Image (spheres, rainbow, N blue to C red):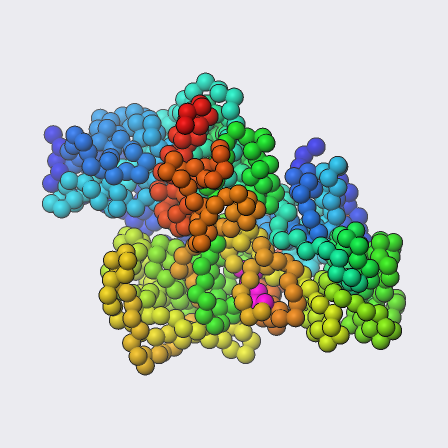
């Protein structure tokens, strides 16, 4: 019998004092006992709300039931019927917004820890050799190009391969994974996990190419000569800056640059690796999203005296996941709310010395219902800093749109799609941050999976 | 043939090497003013390098590399038949090629090689092209013969007077002007101070200056914003909007500060490289 009132298992985490000095994964995998106890809490609801709210439609009650029976191989196969990247999803999906946020046990006993169960299933199946290469349909002879190797594009590629198409993924950088590789740090998503998940997709026959920047190395029109359809999942590779004086001072990073140096280029291993990074004594991260948390936690691991996250609204409006905020706080990151940066101050050598800021109070809610920050008159002060990381969001990378005039975009640079999810060029589909402008890994994957279905219909001659 | 293979390696002087690399995808679409990103080893940096030439038929690209830091020293230790780990491109916005009238192409050091494809494209577009080549000393002055063959006039300047006129490229440009040469536009590639003073002089002489900037880059695709430069008071990303910008309003001093950010760490990295590296090229 299920035991929903048993305490929710949260797994173990590395000790903050230890983990703030390394890049090892913070959240430890469930033990077999923890997994059993947590699986036992699931009620296996009919018309399960968790499953209905999963962006990639994972059959949650079914996989947990298999897990409860000790059938890890069956559980992983069940998950992979709809989602081919379970070890990634189990780690970086904001479950509190999707499955766990809709678990019937949430209010009374605490939601089933679905994220950790998915991760346990994926990691255990991989370790014990129970993860089978998904079966692909008979070859259709149709060729599809997927642009970018981030979550959206890989999800699309995997589903297209499963449908029997011949798929090639084009990546601009030297390593695969897109934002999973350059943005998300290894202490949240170990590099081997990305490698292994991509190996699964490769084992389905998908070809992967590095060093091809579509729009520059080849244009969309060139691809359409060789491929029957194209999926654009090129992501939000353009940092938003503040547009305040001093932003080009030495010691100011965009979150993208800072995270790319640390995560993709592994600058924290310098001089064993060749890309350097400089960290000051007092780091200030501007912004309150998940990239800001990643940047703050990476910065902490490089050994400064202080890391401060400065956010313009209050804790309640902060978009970062609560768990990330908690982890950052445990690691010693300080949060300072209701701050607007006005100018980055620099010395005569052009090095950052601080940020001139004003204090805010909360005003009326904006269009999204979040209370607006309103500047308090005469509240100016200087926040001392010698490293500043600007983490206020990303926008779509403009290279493809710029070199493909037929592609319609909005004024914010995101690609416009019709109701069928098609771009303005026949056979060309798009999804992920290139159409959303900066969302989550899971929504990007969802777009990829849905686009794969549409591309499949298109290639089968259906409208 | 494996992509990224070095087909020809030619030592131009003690620190400068020319590579011909097999990379059909880039050779097919390269245009004057664009660059590639190279990596030499796992864990290696992504280094932007200007495309000096390309051959669509043979599928090859040419780059010229001066060994300055660890990564460029590592590149220059690669031999014919070996591969670069990664070659990505062509990146950046091509230079606007049209008939400006009379143009000066100004190269300092390895900048001479980098300005060469621009000179060629401008010549093909019907411009009268004057090459102004500068280097510290004769040994470091490269591609003079190629430039002389291509351009309507070629002037050389060396700091020590060992070749051409004694002085800087700015002295050579001033002299051209004083001799009645009317120049409409200038395309400058070289060390940042050289570009700064050349642009300033050209402004004074009513020559429209353009300079190709070399800020620090990571991805080279506009993703990180590391390469931001200030032009006309606006922040621009050199990797996608440049590297060539109208030079009158470039904040060169900011560029100097930003490119110097990692100097101490780069020095440390180079020292370790020299200590550990057993050179195969036979020159050291």
> From this viewpoint, which residue is outermost toward the top?
A138
* Badge count: 0
- Residue at image position (31%, 55%) is A320
Q: Does the magenta stretch include residue A164?
A: no
Q: Is residue B139 above or below residue A193?
A: below
Answer left or right for A196 relative to A335. right
Magenta stretch in the rendered image: B226-231
In the drawing, does residue B25 fall left or right of residue A204?
right
- Look at 37% across and 44% down and name the residue there: A441
Quadrant in which the C terminus of chain A appears: top left
Q: Tell me if residue A93 can be seen.
A: yes
Viewport quadrant of the N terminus of chain A: top left
In the rendered image, residue A45, in percent from the top left (x then y), is placed at 16, 32
Q: Can residue A9 be seen in this view?
A: no
Return the residue nearer the eye: A459 or A125: A459
* Front residue (pair A429, A213): A429
Q: Is the stretch drawn in magenta largely helix, strand or loop?
A: strand
Quadrant housing residue B258: bottom right
Q: Where is residue A333 in the image (x, y as percent from the top left)?
A: 34, 63
Q: Where is residue B113 in the image (x, y as percent from the top left)?
A: 76, 55
Q: Whole-percent x and y of residue A207? A: 53, 31
The residue depicted at 40 percent of the width and 75 percent of the height is A356
Residue A393 sits in quarter: bottom left
């Amino acid at each position: 019998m299920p035991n929903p009132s048993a305490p929710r298992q949260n797994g173990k985490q590395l000790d903050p004092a230890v983990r703030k000095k390394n890049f090892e994964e913070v959240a430890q995998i469930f033990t077999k006992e923890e997994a059993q106890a947590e699986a036992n809490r699931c009620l296996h609801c009919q018309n399960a709300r968790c499953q209905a709210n999963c962006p990639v439609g994972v059959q949650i009650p079914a996989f947990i039931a298999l897990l409860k029976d000790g059938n890890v191989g069956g559980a992983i196969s069940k998950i992979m019927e709809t989602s081919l990247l379970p070890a990634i999803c189990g780690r970086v999906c904001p479950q509190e917004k999707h499955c766990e946020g809709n678990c019937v046990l949430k209010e009374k006993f605490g939601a089933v820890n679905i994220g950790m169960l998915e991760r346990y299933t994926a990691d255990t199946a991989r370790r014990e050799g129970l993860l089978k290469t998904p079966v692909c349909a008979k070859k259709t002879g149709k060729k599809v190009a997927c642009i970018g190797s981030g979550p959206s594009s890989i999800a699309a590629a995997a589903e297209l391969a499963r449908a029997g198409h011949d798929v090639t993924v084009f990546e601009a950088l030297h390593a695969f994974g897109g934002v999973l590789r350059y943005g998300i740090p290894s202490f949240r998503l170990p590099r081997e996990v990305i490698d292994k998940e991509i190996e699964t997709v490769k084992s389905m026959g998908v070809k992967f190419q590095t060093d091809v920047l579509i729009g520059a190395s080849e244009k969309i029109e060139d691809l359409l000569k060789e491929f029957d359809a194209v999926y654009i999942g090129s992501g939000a590779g353009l940092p938003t800056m503040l547009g305040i004086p001093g932003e080009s001072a030495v010691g100011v990073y965009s979150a993208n640059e800072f995270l790319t140096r640390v995560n993709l280029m592994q600058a924290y291993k310098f001089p064993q690796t060749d890309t350097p990074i400089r960290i000051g004594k007092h780091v200030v991260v501007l912004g309150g999203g998940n990239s800001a948390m990643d940047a703050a936690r990476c910065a902490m691991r490089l050994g400064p005296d202080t890391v401060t996250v400065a956010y313009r609204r209050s804790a309640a409006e902060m978009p970062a996941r609560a768990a990330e905020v908690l982890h950052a706080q445990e690691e010693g990151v300080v949060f300072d709310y209701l701050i607007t940066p006005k100018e980055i101050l620099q010395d005569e050598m052009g090095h950052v010395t601080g940020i001139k800021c004003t204090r805010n109070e909360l005003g009326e809610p904006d269009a999204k219902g979040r209370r607006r920050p309103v500047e308090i008159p005469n509240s100016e002060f200087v926040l001392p800093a010698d490293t500043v990381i600007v983490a206020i969001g990303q926008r779509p990378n403009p290279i493809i749109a710029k070199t493909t005039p037929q592609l319609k975009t909005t004024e914010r640079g995101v690609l416009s799609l019709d109701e069928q999810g098609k771009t303005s060029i026949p056979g060309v589909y798009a999804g992920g941050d290139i159409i959303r402008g900066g969302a989550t890994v899971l929504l990007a994957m969802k777009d990829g999976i849905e686009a794969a279905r549409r591309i499949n219909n298109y290639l089968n001659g259906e409208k | 043939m494996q992509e990224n293979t070095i087909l020809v390696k030619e030592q131009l002087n003690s620190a400068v090497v020319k590579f011909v690399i097999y990379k059909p995808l880039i050779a097919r679409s390269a245009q004057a003013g664009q660059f590639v990103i190279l990596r030499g080893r796992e864990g290696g940096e992504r280094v932007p390098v200007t495309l000096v030439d390309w051959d669509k038929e043979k599928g090859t690209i040419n780059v010229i590399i001066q060994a300055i830091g660890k990564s460029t020293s590592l590149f220059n230790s690669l031999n014919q038949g070996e591969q670069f780990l990664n070659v990505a491109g062509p990146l950046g916005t091509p230079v606007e090629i049209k008939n400006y009238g009379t143009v000066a192409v100004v190269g300092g050091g390895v900048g001479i090689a980098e300005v060469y494809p621009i000179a060629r494209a401008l010549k093909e577009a019907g411009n009268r092209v004057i090459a102004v080549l500068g280097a510290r000393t004769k040994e470091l002055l490269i591609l003079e013969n190629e430039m002389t063959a291509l351009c309507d006039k070629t002037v050389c300047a060396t700091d020590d007077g060992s070749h051409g006129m004694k002085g800087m490229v700015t002295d050579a440009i001033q002299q051209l002007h004083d001799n009645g040469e009317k120049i409409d536009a200038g395309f400058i590639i070289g060390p940042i101070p050289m570009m700064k003073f050349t642009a300033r002089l050209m402004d004074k002489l009513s020559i429209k200056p353009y300079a190709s900037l070399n800020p620090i880059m990571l991805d080279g695709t506009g993703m990180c914003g590391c390469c931001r430069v200030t032009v006309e008071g606006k922040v621009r990303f050199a990797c996608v909007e440049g590297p060539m910008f109208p030079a009158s309003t470039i904040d060169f001093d900011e560029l100097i500060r930003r490119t110097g950010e990692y100097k101490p760490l780069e020095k440390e990295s180079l020292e370790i490289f020299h200590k550990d590296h057993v050179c195969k090229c036979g020159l050291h």
